[in-house]
Image (cartoon, coloured by chain):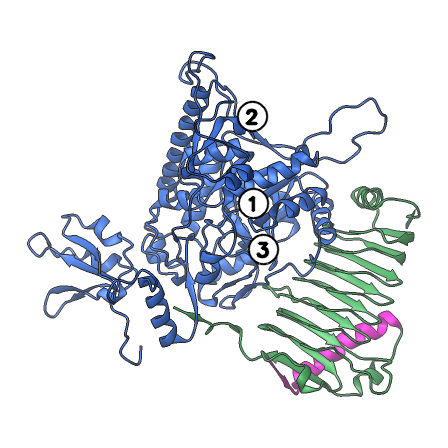
Chain colours: A green, B blue
Amino acid sequence: MEVVNARGLSYQALNETVRSLLDNGHRELVLKGVNGQRYIGAGVQGQGRLEIFGVPGNNLAALMDGLEIEVFGNVQDGVGNTMNDGTVIIHGHATDIAGYSMRGGRIFIRGNVGYRVGIHMKAFRNKNPLIVIGGKAGDFFGEYMAGGTLVLLGLDLQPGEAIVGNFVATGMHGGEIFIRGQVDPYRLGKEVKAIKPTAADQQRLQDIVGDFARYFDLEAEKILARPFIKLIPYNKRPYGTMYAY
Amino acid sequence: MPTLSLMPPEFSVLRDENKCIKCLACARQCGFDAQKYDAEDDRLYTIDANCVNCQRCVSICPVGALTIYKNPPPMRPNAYWSEGHLRNIIKQAETGGVLLTGMGNDQPFPSYFDRLLLNASQVTNPSIDPLREPMELRTYLGSRTEPVTLQEGQDEKTRTPLVPLETPIMFSAMSYGSISHEAFESLARAAKEFGTMFNTGEGGLPEDLYQYADHAVVQVASGRFGVHTGYLNAGRIIEIKIGQGAKPGIGGHLPGEKINAAVSATRMIPEGTDALSPAPHHDIYSIEDLKQLVFTLKEATRYQKPVSVKVSAVHNVAAIASGIARAGADIITVDGFRGGTGAAPTMIRDHVGIPIELAIAAVDQRLREEGIRNQVSLVAAGGFRSSADVVKAIALGADAVYIGTAALIALGCHLCQKCYTGKCSWGIATQDPYKTRRLNPEIGAERLYNLLRGWSHEIKEMLGGMGINSIESLRGNRLHLRGVGLNEVELKLLGVKHAGEAI
């Protein structure tokens, strides 16, 4: 295990250090004192594990293709932007557009997330991206979603606090969203409907929540005790009738 | 159509029965079901309402028996209520939809290219004959170094490599999906053979065409279709597409029926689903955010790929371009309001944006004034019809240009503007294998190569006439331009004198 002290390093120097260590066969890196450096893990392919202490900057794991990153702190905007494969585990909050256009891999966030999380996520062949959020989500959750899975757990909500903002899944035309508890219908985009998860969905949720609970040392049974709703799009061509041909 | 349409046919197809040999080629090749054969009566007939005047049947008829006529307007002539307005209103009354169209703005707005004239040498300095003397068209795209100073610690910026072009003409972004694999491959092959670049558009790069990736500008648009590290590292230049001249400010909807197995594999999305490109990149709401995506891409490719940012020519384009340069882009691509498209709402295509000539002049001027012109190359796109347009654009300040419509015309396009239907009879804007095989990529590449060869030679002739032996010496050299019939504001914006004024 190689320890990198990120304090005072520019993002360019830090990322170059990380990449050359990975290139030279180091498989486990610990980054200490990370303080807003952007693009950590961006475009990195192959196997390896990064532990990050501090707050990584925007676009953590963007275009990433295979690494496992565990962050002991919060992350900023765009974590997993256009990510192709790999795992990101965040022991804190994430802000806007987490998982933008993510095509594969998994992101687990213990806390809350900001706006437009999971926007334009897609699935392709054997790739089925997954984001699990422990807390609550902001507006436009799952906007334009074209594939993959979003799971919103709403743990630690205050009484009367909404689990998700407005305009949930507007423009959604693929994939599925699971939300623990209920969502006021007025918050949903007009392209989606809420249904009851099937038995197969329940089985998947058990696996997903099981992983989530293991990463964050929680009890899966307690989380699963509360029923989920499932959001799916009415069709995969939301704007098919908009034009005069 | 459930009810009788009030729309009279726009075209009439006339078949000379004396010439027709009933080979049925017209009926087989018409992509729009306008040419029909009734086997029972052994009779060819036409459905005029379906004809889009794409000229496919006329071109392939072996005996020249077919002619297509434009019908008179559907009402008495009216200078205000044009035929186009009437047809649009009728179509919308019958469908309730947003009007769609293809290719570039076809409205009679003024063309500044047609009001600019070039200079030539007479007596006081010799003109050069490119047939016998060296003439340099090679152009390098990318960020140049800062001027050398005596201060220490200058120019520590990590630079991406420059990209050479053998001629300052590249093929515009046209995605696989909007055009056929055959058309896409023709562009890729021609770009490689000539030593210039083609642009993948936002639909990814088909796996079998990675052999041409060294001549590819690989695009990253808001939908991020087909974008992964392999794709980014394969291309020579990465382009962030913010806008397109034909549809500034709006996103795209590639309809599900065009997403067949091969298109789905390249875009990396499921078959049959709409490919929706959001109007903005939702990770870019500011110049600071743009900088972030520029450097995400540079980090992901280890600073080995120059990054271009493509925007539409809009009112504030000079300030936007300045922001793009400051955001760390190496190339700024500006697409004018004549730029083509596979599909755009008609109102947007015809009424949004500004002419590319004014945009080039404004951007080049602004970047020079701010002392950052060396940091970026300026590529212009949107309606280049001839080598003279290219020379004028470079004299106004562009480093290179993109041609899209001209390239498609070289491949057979007849500008019927029906790309959005996916029915293209010429095998260009369609995914129907029966039609796409009409376009042989080898022949297509040769036609494109010929076009570049012809234009490049013409550019050399024009340069030689001016007494210039390198395209570099023409760049931003507005003294070689004169305006005709332009008012003072226009002359000032273009930075040119009026014809008749001396230096």
Tell me where residue A93 sits by quadrant. bottom right
Q: Alpha carbon of mark 1 to alpha carbon of mark 3: how far?
A: 23 Å
> Few, some or many C-alpha atoms within 10 Å of disc 2 (few <14, some 14-19, many ≥20)?
some
Q: Circle 2 sits on which residue?
A: B472
Establish whether labels 3 and 2 are both on one chain: yes
Say whether mark 2 and mark 1 are on the same chain. yes
- In percent of width and height, residue A231 lies at 65, 80
Who comes first in sequence, dot 1 or dot 2?
A: 1
Q: Which residues are magenta?
A: A192-216
Q: Which residue is mark 1?
A: B334
The residue lying toward the viewer, choosing from B3 and B181, is: B3
Position of B439 compared to A161: left or right?
left
Sort mark 1 into few (<14), some (14-19) or many (20+) by Cα contacts within 10 Å: many
Q: Which residue is mark 3?
A: B226
**In 3D space, how far apart are the residues under numbered discs 1 and 2 (Cα atoms)?**
20 Å
Please state, as top left, top right, bottom left or bottom right, where the N terminus of chain B lies in the image: bottom left
Q: Is residue B19 above or below residue B3?
A: above
Is residue A202 inside the magenta stretch? yes
Counting residues from the start of the chain, the first of labels 1 and 3 encountered is 3
Q: Amino acid at mark 3?
A: Gly
